[in-house]
Image: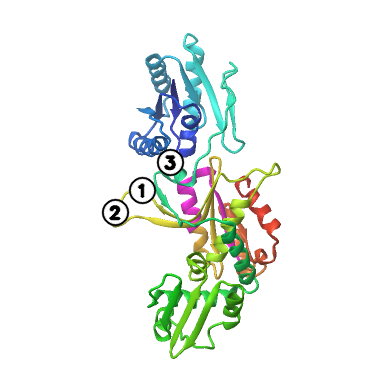
Amino acid sequence: MTYIEFFDKNATDNICACLTQRPERVVMVGRDGKEMQRSVASLKRVLNGRGLKTEFIIRTVNPNNLSTVVSRLEEIVEQYGDCVVDLTGGYDLYLVALGIVFNKRVDKKIELIRFNVQSERVYDCDGNGYPKLFDFPKLRVDENITAYGGEAVWTKWNDSEELFADIEALWSICRRDVKKWNNLIAILEGAEQVSEADKPVETVARVSAMSAVTERLITKSTIDFAILDELREKGFVREYSYKDGTFRIKYKGAQVKRCLTKAGQVLEMKAYLSAIRATDEAGERVYNDVKNGVCIDWDGRDGENDTENEIDVMMMHGLIPVFVSCKNGFVSMDELYKLNTVAQRFGGTYAKKVLIASALDLNGSFGRSFKMRADDMGIKVIANEIVNMTDEEINRKFRSFWNN
């Protein structure tokens, strides 16, 4: 089976047919040969990872010359015989030219299909009753990043009911006063950076060293012992002490320690858990893949000047990626630009963007300006209302992110 693809900058459009129909070869038609070669290399990495050895053939043609496009398409049809043409992407003039070829070459069996990524439907555009119904393709987070030319690694968590229960309990403490919570986590994070402990779940740090790394004076009055006591009462902290200029703390386990020694981690984990738990009206999971702490290398190659970005939570609804940035304290306008840039680069026009800022007041002057800028960029904002939302309200938000 031969597929003809009209190259599109949205890698999603270029890979739909390959994932569903598994063609023997794909003839990629586009304007820029070098750009198509780079894209094809990325697509092949995704397909090879699924055991598909699809052959790609690149054909360049000027999209502004109708007769040239018609001639090139006729050559392809003549060379490869019966074929399927995917109308999902590419220049409009390519589609016009294809209509001409389709009518001229009735001797050839040319099938026309088109994918609607948002509605997850495939359309028969030639009226012959094909294609047959099939499951719409889905991509994992790493496959989506790879298809757009990057490479992704993410934080590994030992997902379990115990971890999820811990996240909920920690979030219930954090949400009461995110400012106090952030102040404490900053101190615990600083202590961990200068820790002299030889056990992974413990931290032992000189207070003077903590003050140096946090760039503020750490004293008994700056540590919120009330929150520490609550963490100890609920079992997240086994013990702690502040004595003779040394701060010591022992955590319940490695995953809890990670939540308590990285700024914003608890909010991030609450978002991660909400994405995992999001279900539709039929009780089916909304997102087929969810990853936390996704570090993206823009070109997937080792180098000294690599461009990298981290997305706090990323999920996939079929072929639609959702990029979520979580800020549990102050948030600047720059965060909108960072999120928008990464999402456009690795999701194109299909990318959905969400920023969760638990300390942002949208009723203030800065908040109103922030919201207007976010709206201009197509970024959904959940601000400080999240601290008062029920689990069902949060989950309802997450259910809709891919479709807004």
Q: Is residue 339 magenta?
A: yes
Quick check: 290 left or right of 295? Answer: right
Q: Is residue 215 magenta?
A: no
Q: Do the residues under discs 2 and 1 have CB atoms within 8 angstroms? A: yes
Density class for disc 1 (Cα within 10 Å; few <14, some 14-19, many ≥20) is some
**Marks 3 and 1, Cα distance to the nearest angstrom?**
11 Å
Residue 340, position as x, y percentages in the image:
50, 54
Residue in the image at 55% along x and 28% along y: 114
Residue occupying the far top of the picture: 107
Q: Closest to the observer: 255 or 313? A: 255
Q: Amino acid at mark 1?
A: Asp
Density class for disc 2 (Cα within 10 Å; few <14, some 14-19, many ≥20) is few
Disc 1: which residue = 299
Which secondary structure is most common in the magenta stretch?
helix
Q: Quadrant of residue 224?
A: bottom right
In primary-sequence order, the first of circles 3 and 1 is 3
**Marks 2 and 1, Cα distance to the nearest angstrom?**
10 Å
Q: Is residue 160 visible?
A: yes
Q: Amino acid at mark 3?
A: Ala
Q: Secondary structure at mark 2?
A: loop
Q: Closest to the observer: 175 or 195? A: 195
Residue 208's place in the image compared with 327, above or below, is below
Give the magenta-colored segment's residue range.
338-358
Disc 3: which residue = 147
Q: Amino acid at mark 2?
A: Gly
Q: Closest to the observer: 34 or 52? A: 52
Disc 2: which residue = 303
Q: Do the residues under discs 3 and 2 have CB atoms within 8 angstroms? A: no
Q: Secondary structure at mark 1?
A: loop
Q: Secondary structure at mark 3?
A: helix
Residue 339's place in the image compared with 263, above or below, is above
Q: Is residue 373 visible?
A: no
